[in-house]
Amino acid sequence: MYPPDQRTPSLPPIHSVKLRVNGKVTELQIAPWTTLLDALREYMDLTGTKKGCDHGQCGACTILVNGKRINSCLTLAIMQEDTEITTIEGLAPQDGSSAGQLHPLQQAFIERDAFQCGYCTPGQICSAVGLMNEGKARTTADIRELMSGNICRCGAYTNIVDAIEDVLNQKTV
């Protein structure tokens, strides 16, 4: 029992948020401190986006918001209303004659064996799509610098860079 002069702590209100993820709008009831990463994984069952360090240092949680790459562990879900969120699950064509095909970077990662354990792969691919959207990567050194926020503990960096260069040279993104 609390003394009469102390109030009982109360839980903060739950917020309703509408997120547009991979072209589909979903309404969630979440705590205000829920990260976008946790909203995707825990509330929407989109587990392709990985939780690595939870501090924005490894890049495993990289997704695209309005075509730009971000670490989803560093943004709150409630901050992303009215944005277009794309996860690894939403990169491949979903409709029409292209349904069932992989995104060119997904295909290049397979062809170049640009993964070993695969844990970082979704973040690597989303980061590479964002890198290409930025239009700043012109050389191998540019790619390495612009991808430096994505850590691969297996050391598949050479093949990752090769896969990105393949797609850049094809100009298919």
Image (tube, helix red, strand yellow):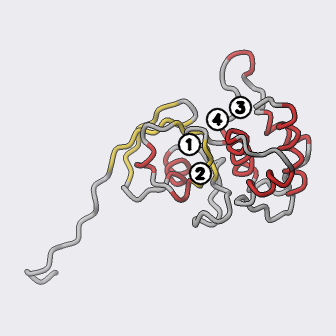
Q: Are marks 1 and 3 in contact (CB under 8 Å)?
A: no
Q: Residue at x 33, y 49 (%)?
A: 15
Q: Which residue is mark 2?
A: 70
**Residue denoted by label 3:** 92
Tag 4: amino acid: Gly
Residue holding disc 4: 90
Q: With 123 as the anchor, is 137 left or right in this view? A: right
Residue ranking furthest to the left: 4
Q: Is residue 55 above or below residue 71?
A: below
Query: Which disc, if any, is residue 65?
Result: 1
Q: Mark 1 or mark 3: which is in front?
A: 1
Cα separation, mark 1 vs mark 3, equals 16 Å
Residue 92 place in picture, x, y as percent: 71, 31
Contact between labelled residues 2 and 1, with CB atoms less than 8 Å apart: yes
Mark drawn on residue 14: none
Q: Are marks 3 and 4 in contact (CB under 8 Å)?
A: yes
Which of label 1 and label 4 is nearer to you?
Answer: 1
Residue 72 or residue 170, whichever sits in front: 170
**Identity of the residue drawn at 40% across and 49% down:** 78
Instruction: Give percent across and percent down for residue 72.
Output: 56, 53
Q: CA distance from mark 2 to mark 4?
A: 15 Å
